[in-house]
Amino acid sequence: MQMDKKDSRFRELLREASWYRFFSLCFQPPRESLRGEIEAICKELGKEKNFFKSLLNSEDLQDSHHRIIGSAGVCSPCESEYVGDRLGGKGKILADVAGFYKAFAFNPQIELHDSADNIAIELSFMSYITLKLAYAFFRDEKEEIEICSDSKKKFQKEHLFLWVHLFVEKLNEVAEGSFYEKVAMMIRDFIK
């Protein structure tokens, strides 16, 4: 493979992983370091501080998280709430998602103690598997490239892409103009 193409693809995968990480951070419950982490990833993505500020628009993340997507929120951040009936119930979804995580040694509990099908965790996994793919690509490990690429596409198709548009629609209904709705709209555009 030509070095320019290889380098270009590697950088493209790193950028994609960074975007997934950005989205994951945005949907995590607020903690003291969260704003700084989101701002740092914005810089990595080449977005200036005003980009993050315009998304946040002086909104109190703690309050809006609990009111909108927290445990008492009006919009569930979990896949099984949107497609559970169609896919054989919550247990089947959680087992399948956990199978992906286990296959790639991804431990979602390190970062977030929540349901495995939470949007923040699924997006974190997408960042993780995209980084693994980038590393395999960089090292020209053809078998690893194929495994990571196939699994990434399968997870997107069978999980994330199956329900994220429903999540975005719900946020449009119940949280118009909020930080979470703005980020959800960005995800929708990112995964097209």
Image (spheres, rainbow, N blue to C red):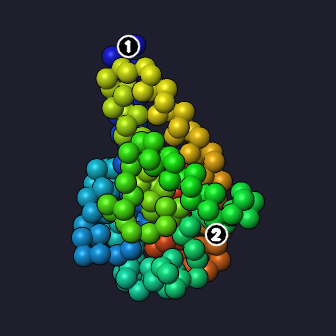
**Rendered location of residue 169, percent (x, y):** 65, 68
Which residue corresponds to the image point at 38% horizontal and 45% vertical from the top-left? 105
Q: Is residue 139 above or below residue 124?
A: above
Which residue corresponds to the image point at 44% horizontal and 22% vertical from the top-left? 143
Which one is in front in this view, the residue at disc 1 or the one at disc 2?
2
Q: In this view, does 70 lie above or below 157?
A: below
- The residue pinned by badge 1 equals 2
Which residue corresponds to the image point at 38% horizontal and 26% vertical from the top-left? 137
Q: Residues within 10 Å of mark 1 (few under 14, many from 20)?
A: few
Q: Please state which of residues 101 and 72 is positioned toward the viewer in this rendering.
A: 101
- The residue pinned by badge 2 equals 81
Q: Residues within 10 Å of mark 2 (few under 14, many from 20)?
A: some
Q: Please state which of residues 27 and 96 is positioned toward the viewer in this rendering.
A: 96
Q: In this view, does 90 lie above or below 62?
A: above
- Alpha carbon distance from label 1 to label 2: 45 Å
Secondary structure category for the residue under label 1: loop
Q: In this view, does 68 lie above or below 139?
A: below
Furthest-top residue in this view: 1
